[in-house]
Amino acid sequence: MSPFWLSYLPLAIILSSLLPGLIIFTLKEQQVKLRISLNLLGVTVKLILVLIMWQAVKAGDIFYFSVPFLPGADLVLQGDALSLLFVVLSSVLWLATTIYAIGYLENSPLRSRFFGYFSLCVSATVGLALSGNLVSFLLFYELLTLATFPLVVHRGTPQSLAAGRRYLAYTLGGGLLLLTGVALLHSLVQSPQFVPGGYVSAVVSEHSGLLQLAFGLMIAGLGVKAALLPLHGWLPQAMVAPAPVSALLHAVAVVKAGAFGIIRLVYDVFGVESMQLLQLAEPLMLLAAATILYGSWRALAQQDIKRRLAYSTISQVSYITVGVAMLGPLAAVGGLVHLVHQGVMKITLFFCAGNYAETLGVHKINELNGAGRRMPLTSVAFTLGALGMIGIPPTAGFISKWYLGLGAVASDNQLMLLVFVFSGLLNAAYFLPIIYRLWFLPQRGSWPDEQRLSARLETHWMLLLPMLFTALLIILMGLFASTGISPLSWAELIVEREFSYD
Amino acid sequence: MIDLSPWLWPGAGLGLVTELQQVWWYFSLSLWLVAAAFSLAFMAKAAHKRRYWLFFGLSFAGNMLLIGALDAISFYLGFSVMSLSAYGLVVHSGDKTARRAGRLYLQLAIIGELLLFAALILRASAADGQYDWQSWQQVPLDHLTILLTITGLGLKAGFWPLHIWLPQAHPAAPAPASAVLSGAMIKAGVLGLVMFLPAGDPLLQYWVPYMVCLGFFSAGFGVLASLLYRQPKVILAYSSVSQVGYILILVALAWTANAAAVLPVLIAYAAHHAFAKGALFLFAGVNAKQPLPGYWQLFFWLPALALMAIPLSGGAAIKTGLKSLLSEMSVPGWLNTDILTGLLTLGALLTALLFLHLAAALRQQQRELTSRYGLAPAPGFALYWQGACLLVLLLVLIWLPWQWQPMQQLSLQTLAWPKIWALSFPLFLAVLLVYIARWRQWRLPATYYDRNSAVLLWSLWLKRLYQPQRQWQAPRLKFNWRAAERALNRLAPANVVSSSALLLLIMLLAGAAFL
Amino acid sequence: MMILLLVLPLLSALLMLLWPRIAPLLALFSAAASSLLALQLLLQVAEQGTRYWLLAGWPSGLAIAWQADTLSCLLILLSTVLQLLVGLYAFATRSRDKLSQGFWPLSTLLQLSLTALWLSRDLFNLYVCLELLGLVAVALVSLSGRKAIKPAFNYLLLSLFGSLCYLLGVVLLYGAYGLLDIAGLASQWQAGWLSNSALLLMSLGLMLKAAIWPLHAWLPAAHAAAPAPVSALLSALVVKGPLFILCLLWLQLASTSQAQAMAPLFAAAGLAALLFGGWSALRTPFAKNLVAYSTVAQLGYATLALGLMLTFDQPLIFAALWLFVLAHALAKAACFLAIGEMSATLGGKRLTILKGASQTMPLAMFAFAVAGGSLIGLPPSGGFLAKWALLQGLWLQGEQLFWPLALVFATLLSAAYVFRVVVLAFDRADPVAPDFAPQLVPQWLALLPALAVWAMALFSEPLLLLLRLEAL
C-alpha cells in the first residue's frame, strides 16, 4: 500500500457515496437497473474502503487529509478509531437500508431524487464521522440537514411538509447555535484537529466563562439532532417520512450525528480534565437523564407505531450522552457501544414498522393484533429489537446497558443506575404490549390494506432480508461481545486510546 | 465445564461444578422432562400448541442455563429467558383470568429483572469487573446490594410479601406449566439467593434473623390464605408460598458460616418440594378435567403426605433436619430458638390443615364433574400416560429419602419413636381440628372466600399508568396575529416618495442632534 | 487597463445605439472582455499593490483620480461577471420574454457607471457615477412596460432626491475645504457642525439610494416590477454602489468621534433591516417581492457590519462586510434569475405558483435553494464565510453576547423565508403545471452564480486575507 493514495482514503470513502448520488440525480425515472447497480456499486466500494481503513486503524494508523478552508481551520478529514465506529455503522446500515428502500419504493414516483438525496445523506454522515476538526464537522452537520430535508418531505403531503418545516426550524436553529459556539471557540483557541484529551486546557483558567458559553451553545446545537430534552420536538413529527428514511434518520444519520458530535466535543475538544474543571459534565448528564425518562414516558401514550418508536429514540439516544457525560472509561464504553447497538436495534424496529405498513397497511398499535401469525419473521425481528431496547440479555441492548450501569457505579453516579432501571421499566411498558398484541391476541377483522408482495414469503424479500440481517446482528453483537470484531471491543479500543493521552 | 470467556464475556462458563448445581440441575431437569411428557398427552387437544411448546422449550432452556451458569451474566441470561418465556405459559389459555394473571406476572417479572440487574451491576462493580461466582465469594456486600438481590430474586421465589403473582399465575397456567413454575422456576430465585450472596459475609449476618422470621411468616401466611380459597390450584399455589417460606429459612441459614451443614438440607428440601409439588399440580390438572377412577387418589395422597412430613417420607427427614439446624442457630437476643422450633411444629399443623383442605376441594371438584359427566369412563391411553408421568414422580419421591446420600442420614434419624411422635401429632391434631370444624360448622361469612386479590386492582392501575390514553400536552398558544398584521400593513404609507423624503428629513434632524 | 475597462463599455454602448441589431452580441462581448480585463487587473493589483491613475495627466487635486485596490478590483470583477451572466440569460430568454432592445445599451452603461464608481476616490466623481447609475437603473426598471411606471417613477424621484442630498453635502465640503479628493479631505478633516452636517446629508442620501432601512420603501416595488435580469442586476449590484461610497465616507473620512457616535445607529438600522426585511419576506405573497425584501434584509448585514466596524475597528468585520456584499450579489442574482425563470414558465407572480416546482423545474429550484443556502449562511458558502468572519470579529472583542445572538435570530429569519419557498416546491399534493416546456439553458445560467457563491468557500483564505489587508 502506497502512502500516497492512503491519504486520500477518507476522501474516497465520502466520494464513494457522493458520486453515485450525484449521478443518480441525473438519471431518468425508468432507468431502474442502472440506478440500482450504481447504488450497490457505491455501497460495495464504500464497504471495501472502510474495511481497508478499519484494518489500518486497528493496527494504529491514523488517516489524514486536509484542504485549506478558513484561516486557522482547514477542512480536515481524519480517520481514527472513533470516527471509524460511526463510519462502519453508517456504511453497513446504508447497505441494509438501500436494499430495503429499493424494495420499499418499488414502483413509487420520484425514485431518482430519493436515492440521490439518500446517497447525499450518507455521504454527509460519513463525512461528519470522518471530519477532523470542528469546522469540518460543522460543515457536514449542515450538509446533513440539507440532505435529509428532501427525504423528510419526500411524500409531499401537507403533513410531511409541515413536518419538514418543523425539522428545518429545529435543525437549522441548532446548526446556527453550533456555528456560534464553534466560532466562539475558534476565536479562543482556533480549531485544531480533534485530539484525545482536548485542546482547550491552555485557556481554561483564563476564559472559563466563555468556554462554558461555547460548550453550552454547541451542546444546544448538537442537542437538536441528538434530540435532547427541550429540543426533541422535530423527531416524532419527522415520522411521516417513508420507512427507510425514518429508519436511517433515527437509527443512523441524524440523531447519531448529534450524539457523535457530543462525544467528539466532550472527549476530543474539551477533554475529560477540562470538562471536570469547567463543571460541564454534570448538567449535561442530568439533562440527558431527564431526556431518557421523558422520552420513555411520552412513548407510553403514543398509539402510532412509528411515533412510539420515535419517542423511544429520543430516550435511547440520550443513553449515549449520559454515557459520555459520566466521564468514566466504563461509561464511555457503554455510551460508544450504544451508538452502534441502538442504531442496529432501532433500524430493525423501523424496518419492521415499515413492513407492517407496507404489507398490511397497519400504522396503529391497536391494529397489530395477531400480526405475528401473518408475518412471523417480521414479528420475530420486532420482538428481538424490542427486547434489545429493554435490555434483556442476550441482545445487544443488554451489553450497552450493562456497561453504562457499570460506568455509573464506577464514576459514583448511583442516581444514573436508578435512571437506567426506571427507563428499562418504561421501555418494557411500551414495548411489551406491542409484542403481546403481535403474538397473543387474535387478529381483529381484516387488515387495513393488505398486499401480497410475494408468493411464498410474508412480504417482499427485499423488505425481509435487511431486517433479518440487522435482527441477527442484535443477537450476535449481544452474544459475542467479547470477540475481536464486536462493537464492544472496538469501543474499548477507542476508550483506551481516548483515556491514555497523557 | 465449558469455558466461554474468549467468546462471550470474561468469566463466562457453563458447568456443574458444585454439588448444589449438580443436584439442582438434575432435579429440575427431571421435573421438566416429566412435565414435558405429561404435556404430550395433556395438551394434545389444546389450541396454540406450537406456541405452548415454544415457550415451554424456551423457559426450559433458560432454567437449565441459569443452573449451569458459572458466572452472574450467564445466570442472568438464563433467568431472563426463563422469566419472560414463562409469560407465554401463564397466558396460554388466553381467557380473562389468564390474561390478568399474565399481566401481573410480567409486570413483576420485569421489575424483578431490573432490580436484579441493578444488583448485578453493583456487585460486578464491587468485584472490579469479574462476573464469575468464584471471585464474587471474596467480595464484601453492602446493604443496598443485598436488598436489591433479595427483592429481585425474591419476586421469582415468591415468599411473602413478594408472592403476589403466584396465586394468580399458577392456577391460570396449564397444569404441566404450573408444575414447572412451582417446582422448578421459583427454585431459580432460591438458587440465585444462595449463589449471589456469599455465605459468611458479615453484613449479610444482620439479615439472617429477619429473613428467618420472614420465612416463618410466609410459611404461616401461605396456609392461612389458602384456607380462604376453594380452587385446588390456588390452594396449591399458596402451599408453594408457604413451602418457599421454609426454603427461605434454609437459605438464610445457608448465608451463615454454617453453610456446609445447611446446603444439603436446602438442596433436599428444594428437590423434594419440586417433585411433590410438581406431582400435585399435575394431579390437580387431571382432576379438574375428568372424573377419575378411585385409585388415582393415591397420586394425590402420596405427595401430599410427603409434604405434610408424615414419618418415613422425605418431608419428615427434611423437617427434622430443619429443626436441628434451627436449634443450632445463633440468634440475636430478641429471638428464641425454642420459639422457632415451636413454630415449626405449628407450621406442620398448618401444612396438614392446608392439604386436608385441598383434599376436600379436590373431592368437591370430582363431585361436580361426576354430576356433570356421570361416572368415570374407561380410562383411555391419555389418562394412562398421564398417570405414568405422575407415577415416575411418585417413585422418585419415595426413592429419594432412602437412596440419596444427603437425605439418607436425615431419614434414618426420623425412625426413632419420639421423632415419629413429634412428627405425627400435628397431623392428628390437624385431622381432629378439621373434624371439629366440620362438626361445629366453623365458617367465615361467604364473602371472605374466593375473593379476587387486591393485587389485580393494583396491576390494573399500573397498566393504566403505563398505557395512558392521553398525556399532558404542551399547551399550544392560539394567537390570531393575522389581524394585527393586517392593521400594521395598513399603517404602511401609501405614498412611498413623500413618506421616504419626510423620513429622511426627520433622520437628518435626529442625526444632527446625535452627532 | 483601467481605462480600457471604462472605455470598452462606453464604446460598445455607443455602437449599440448606432447598430441596434448586433446590440446583444456587443453587450455580451464587452462584458466578457471586461471580465477578463478585470480578472487580470485583480491579479496585477494583488501582486503589485494598489494602482493609481490620473485622468489626462492633470496634477492631483484637479484631475479625476482613479484608484484600483483589491476591493475595487474584486467588485469590478464581480460586476462584469454578473453582467455577462445576466446578459447571457437575457439573450437566452429573448424570444420568450420580449425584452426591449433598450436593455442592452442600458446594461452596458450600468456596467460603465459601476466600474467608474468602484474606481473613483473623489466625491464629485462619485456623484457623477451615482447619478448615472441611478438614471440607468430607473430606465432599466421602466423596461417592463406600463405596470412598472409607478415604481420606476418613485424610484426616479427618490433617487434624484438622494443624489441631491449627497450633492448638497459635497458642496458643503467643497466650500469648506476646497477639495473633493477623499484622501486629501481626510488629511484636513476637522470634526465640526459643518463636516457633521455634510456627512449626515451625504449619508442619508446614500442610504436612500442604497435602500438601507428605514429608507428602503421604494426597493421592493421597483425590484419586483423590473424584468428578471434587471432585478438581478439591481439587487446584486446597483444598491451596492451607494453602500460603497457610504463605507468610504465613514471609514476613511469621518473622524473617530463621529464614527463612534454614528456606529450604534448604523448597527441598529442594520439589525432593524434584518428583522423587518426578513419578516416581510416571510409574509409577502409574491415571489419576487420575497427576493426583494430579502435584499433589504441582506443589506442590513452590511449596515450592521459597518456599524460594528465603526465601533470595534476590527479588520475581520470589514472583511465580513465586503464578503457579505460579494456573496449577496452572487446569490441574489441567482435567486432573481431562478424565480424569474420559474414565474415565467409556471405563469404567475404569486408564491403559490411554485408548488411542486421541485418536480417541474428541479434545476431552477435547486439554483434558488443553493443561493438561498448562501443567504442563510450555510457552510461552505460565501454567506457562511461572511458570517464566520463577522462572528470571529465579534467574539474577538470579548464578552459580546447580544450581537451574535441577534445574528443567529436574523439568520433564522432568513432561513425561514428561503425554506418557505423550498417547502412549497416540495408540495406534491397539487403541483402547478408549467405553461410550456421548461428551458434548460436559463436554468443553468441561474444556477451558475449560485454555484459560484459556494465556490467562494474554496478561496476563502485568500479572500479573507485580501479584504482584511484592505482595511489596514
Image (cartoon, helix red, strand yellow):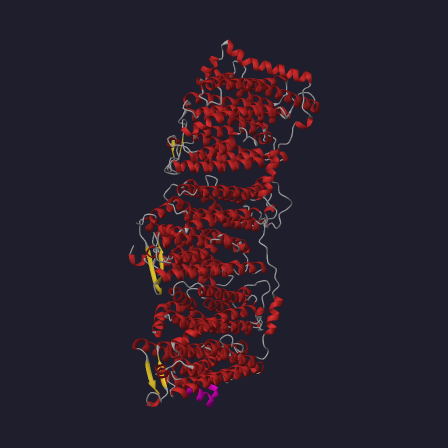
Say if residue A396 shows up in the picture: no
Residue B333 position, x and y percent, is 47, 22
Q: Is residue C132 magenta?
A: no
Name the side, left or right, on which A301 lies relative to B368.
Answer: left
Q: Residue at x 36, y 72 (%)?
A: C467
Q: Residue furthest top?
A: B417
Residue C244 position, x and y percent, is 42, 78
Residue C243 position, x and y percent, is 44, 77
Where is residue C383, by image quadrant? bottom left
Q: Height in image: B5 above or below C248? A: above
Say if residue B411 shows up in the picture: yes
Where is residue B2, by image quadrant? top left
Bounds of the magenta segment: C10-23
Residue A478 position, x and y percent, is 43, 41
Q: Is residue C17 magenta?
A: yes
Between B219 and A415, which is closer to the camera in this rendering? Answer: A415
Name the side, left or right, on which B454 lies relative to A76.
Answer: right
Q: Height in image: C27 above or below A80? A: below
Q: Quadrant of the N terminus of chain A?
A: bottom left
Q: Height in image: C359 above or below B296? A: below
Where is residue C142, by image quadrant? bottom right
Q: Main secondary structure of the magenta part?
A: helix
Between B193 and C198, which is closer to the camera in this rendering? Answer: C198
Question: How many numbered badges does the structure rendering display?
Answer: 0
